[in-house]
């Protein structure tokens, strides 16, 4: 059994390793310092967060936190972040009673020292997380192009698209895709040298090499690879020295036709204080994006991941969660991780548990998608009144809003034309049919209509 002193030592080791990765002293003192580990077994690490903001902070940095823990203990674990006092107390009680086992550590304050992987040992590794593969990446309309490009460059690194720039908001799967590319190349080309690094690590390594007069080692590490996968390049902004070194590294790899894949949380043009010559290099490659998942993709992600976790979650609960305001894959994983903990202790996964999981993420309760919701969203989107949409008013703006609302009731709710007619103030059945048909045709021919429909769908879902 691990003592609480052992937990403290484990957390101190994590803090020491994660500080240079995070790079922000303010974030470190605000979110990392007040947190602690309250439960740890072979598969799960539970971190107590001071409040919901800290919980969200950790959730957004799941991959980088998980990567550091993997280096420390030598294998991957599922991470759970919680600010719920009752839940934290429950895990503390389980830890205190010995309701877990960990085969690789003994008790005592030094329990985790032997498992720490030194910086030198990790320099020769690819830093790839093996669980992130193409096989468990759920593909939907929101990421089809990014996935297609990723699989093609994994099959022919340095040949088809180079460099590749993937941009997406936090938690939508760009890090997963980078690891999947590396893992696929590693599987097909064992002799290739692959390196995945967050930009913060590149910056930290660069600063350390200057301080310790080891620039030759630094350049050998980054310029001798066949595939460079660099995550969150936006953090290179305002760092002129790091930008200069990355520019030279980029040129060296590109000149020798080595594959470069870069991710960012925004478009190239939106990265502030990025040198123009770097922007030009990135823009000369292939750019692709990942959008927020819609209802269908969220449902598919939950179905796939729950199957991978061997969890039996009712279709009703998954359907309700997919209709909530979940905005990214990481939030979905966070909820499923909480479900996994419940299941591992014999507790049933109920709708109440789903609502509690959503509240932990500061997400509004599950909302029912119906005609009223669709009309409300459409009215706010076009800045018109709901009563005007369902009126007989034939102004151009109202007709557009009315037709789109009808079309969404038809495609999202699968309502009959007659039911839509009844719920839109007793319209004629043929008017609904014509309106839906008009939007359907223009969706494929008019970019503005397509944009309206897609954006409103995201707001509804």
Image (cartoon, rainbow, N blue to C red):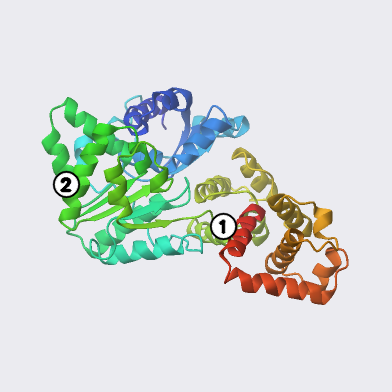
Q: Which mark is residue 77?
A: none
Q: Position of residue 280 (x, y in %)?
A: 29, 49
- As drawn, 172 above or below 237: below
User: For the residues marked 1 and 2, what is the alpha-carbon distance in whole angstroms?
Assistant: 39 Å
Farthest residue, direction right: 426
Contact (Cβ within 8 Å) of mark 1 with mark 2:
no
The residue most toward the front is 395
Comparing marks 1 and 2, which lies closer to the viewer? 2
- Residue bearing mark 1: 298
Residue at left offset 73%, top offset 59% = 397
Which secondary structure lies at badge 2?
Answer: helix
328, 410: nearer the viewer:
410
235 relative position to 368: left or right:
left
Q: How many marks?
A: 2
Kindly identify the residue that appears in the image at 50 percent across and 60 percent down. Answer: 142
Q: Nearer the viewer, residue 428 or 365?
A: 428
Quarter occupied by the C terminus? bottom right
Label 1 element class: helix
**Residue 68, how many percent across, how many down?**
34, 38
Label 1 vs 2, first from the N-terminus: 2
**On-image quarter of the N terminus:** top left
Q: In the rendered image, is residue 72 in sight?
A: no
Quarter assignment of residue 29? top left
Mark number for residue 223? 2
Residue 421 at x, y percent in the picture: 83, 69
- Does residue 209 appear left or right of residue 390 in this picture? left
């Amino acid at each position: 059994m691990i003592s609480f002193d052992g937990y403290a030592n484990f957390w101190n080791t994590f803090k020491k390793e994660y500080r240079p990765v995070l790079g922000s002293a303010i974030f470190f003192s605000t979110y990392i310092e007040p947190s602690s580990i309250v439960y740890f077994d072979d598969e799960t690490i539970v971190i107590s967060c001071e409040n919901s903001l800290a919980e969200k902070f950790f959730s957004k940095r799941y991959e980088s936190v998980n990567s550091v823990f993997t280096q420390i203990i030598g294998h991957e674990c599922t991470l759970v972040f919680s600010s719920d006092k009752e839940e934290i107390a429950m895990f503390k009680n389980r830890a205190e009673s010995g309701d877990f086992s960990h085969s690789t550590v003994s008790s005592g304050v030094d329990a985790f020292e032997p498992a720490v992987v030194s910086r030198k040992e990790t320099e020769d590794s690819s830093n790839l997380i093996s669980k992130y593969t193409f096989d468990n990446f759920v593909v939907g309309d929101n990421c089809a192009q990014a996935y297609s490009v990723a699989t093609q460059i994994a099959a022919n690194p340095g040949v088809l698209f180079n460099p590749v720039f993937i941009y997406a908001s936090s938690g939508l799967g760009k890090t997963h895709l980078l690891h999947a590319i590396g893992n696929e190349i590693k599987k097909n080309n064992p002799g290739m040298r692959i390196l995945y690094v967050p930009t913060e690590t590149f910056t930290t390594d660069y600063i350390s090499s200057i301080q310790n007069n080891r620039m030759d080692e630094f350049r050998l590490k980054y310029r001798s690879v066949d595939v460079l996968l660099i995550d969150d390049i936006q953090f290179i902004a305002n760092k002129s020295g790091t930008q200069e070194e990355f520019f030279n590294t980029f040129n060296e790899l590109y000149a020798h036709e080595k594959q470069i894949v870069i991710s960012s949380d925004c478009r190239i043009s939106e990265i502030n204080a990025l040198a123009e010559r770097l922007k030009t290099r990135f823009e000369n490659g292939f750019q692709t994006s990942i959008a927020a998942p819609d209802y269908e993709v969220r449902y598919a992600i939950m179905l796939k991941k729950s199957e991978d976790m061997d969890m039996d979650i009712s279709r009703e609960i998954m359907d309700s969660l997919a209709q909530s305001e979940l905005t990214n894959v990481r939030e979905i994983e966070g909820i499923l991780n909480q479900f996994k903990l419940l299941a591992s202790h014999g507790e049933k996964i109920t709708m109440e548990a789903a609502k509690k999981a959503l509240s932990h993420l500061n997400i509004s309760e599950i909302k029912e998608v119906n005609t009223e919701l669709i009309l409300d969203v459409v009215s706010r989107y076009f800045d018109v009144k709901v009563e005007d949409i369902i009126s007989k008013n034939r102004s151009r703006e109202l007709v557009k809003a009315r037709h789109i609302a009808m079309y969404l009731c038809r495609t999202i709710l699968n309502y009959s034309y007659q039911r839509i007619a009844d719920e839109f103030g007793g319209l004629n059945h043929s008017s609904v049919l014509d309106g839906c048909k008009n939007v359907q045709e223009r969706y494929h021919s008019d970019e503005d209509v397509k944009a309206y429909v897609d954006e409103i769908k995201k707001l509804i879902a």
